[in-house]
Every structure is written in structure tokens, then in C-alpha cells.
Image: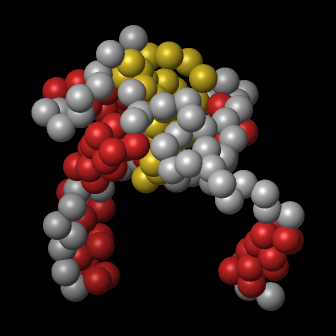
Amino acid sequence: MTAIDEMLRNNAGYAAAFGKGELPSAPSKRLAVVTCMDARIVPLRALGIEEGDAHVIRNAGGVVTDDVIRSLTVSQRKLRTIEVMVVMHTKCGMHGLADAEFRDEVEAEAGQRPAWPSGGFPDLEQAVREGVGKLQTSPFLPHKDQLRGFVYDVETGRLREVV
């Protein structure tokens, strides 16, 4: 059985007991979370949120990219969110990833250079600050009073705010 087959079997059990089909599309906590796709992070558990509470936007590194800003713009302008958490984490594979080298490697194997940067970063806390800074200077986000950045420790499960 493949992992996808296992997920489909799990979903059948989940759907059989599903009772949340009436939730509105706007998150009840008016919160959006930007975080990494790392499998060690389960934002719903780590933050104590349930279905319907918040938007969770995930990518490699939890890096604030143009696509993250696009998603947050929709989240704020159409679905009423007003707070944003940027959550990066310790022991991230993007920490120390050199963009030029990675793009060279992909080009050598795929025969085409990616048009997008990898988003690797040399300093974790600085990357959190830069992500929050990009959100604060974006002309597309109307709500900027509650933009905060954090580092999630994958060994302890704790969040630490980056000021």
C-alpha cells in the first residue's frame, strides 16, 4: 500500500464522522499563520487551533514570498483576517541553503533553471524579521498592527517570539 492509499483510507474514516461542513470560510480567530511545510510541525496541534479558526499558509522554510503575500492579501481583504503569525523553526532544511548552488543543481538535473529563488537563509532570526518586515511594507495588506514573528523549536515544541 502506498502512502497515498493509506491517506485515502484514513480520509474515509475521517469523512464518515465529519460534522464540520457548516463552518464559514472566514476564520473565526481572524488569524493567518505562515509556517514551514516541515513534517515535524503540525500547526493545529502546536498552536491549539481547530478547523475554522485560522488560515495556515505553508511553504519550504515558512519564507514570506510573493505567493504568501498573495494568499494573505486574499485572507485579509476577502476573508476578514487581521492578525498574522510568521513561524519559522529550528533545524530547518532551508537554513543555510545557498540559492545559487541549489538553482545550479536543479538546472543540471532538470535542464532548466528555476525562475524562483529557493528562499534559503543564513540566519534564522533575521529571516523571521525579514519576513515580518516584508509584510509590514506590503502595500497589499490592509491590517498590519498584529504582524508577529516566531521561532518554533522542533526539539521542545515551544514558540519563541522574535522581536
Tell me which residue sits at (56%, 18%) in the image. Answer: 160
The N terminus is located in which quarter? bottom right
Residue 86, percent across and down? Answer: 43, 32
Total marks in image: 0
Left or right placement of residue 110 versus residue 4 in this view: left
Determine the image quadrant of residue 159.
top right
Residue 80, percent across and down? Answer: 40, 36
Left or right placement of residue 155 versus residue 82 in this view: right
Residue 153, percent across and down? Answer: 62, 29
Left or right placement of residue 112 versus residue 119 in this view: left
Tell me which residue sits at (61%, 44%) in the image. Answer: 52
Residue 145, percent across and down? Answer: 32, 16
Tell me which residue sits at (24%, 65%) in the image. Answer: 103
The C terminus is located in which quarter? top left
Determine the image quadrant of residue 149.
top left
Q: Residue furthest top?
A: 163
Report whether residue 26 is seen. Answer: yes
Report whether residue 36 is seen. Answer: no
Determine the image quadrant of residue 7.
bottom right
Above-or-below relation of 108 to 66: below
Looking at the image, which is closer to me, 8 or 50?
Answer: 50
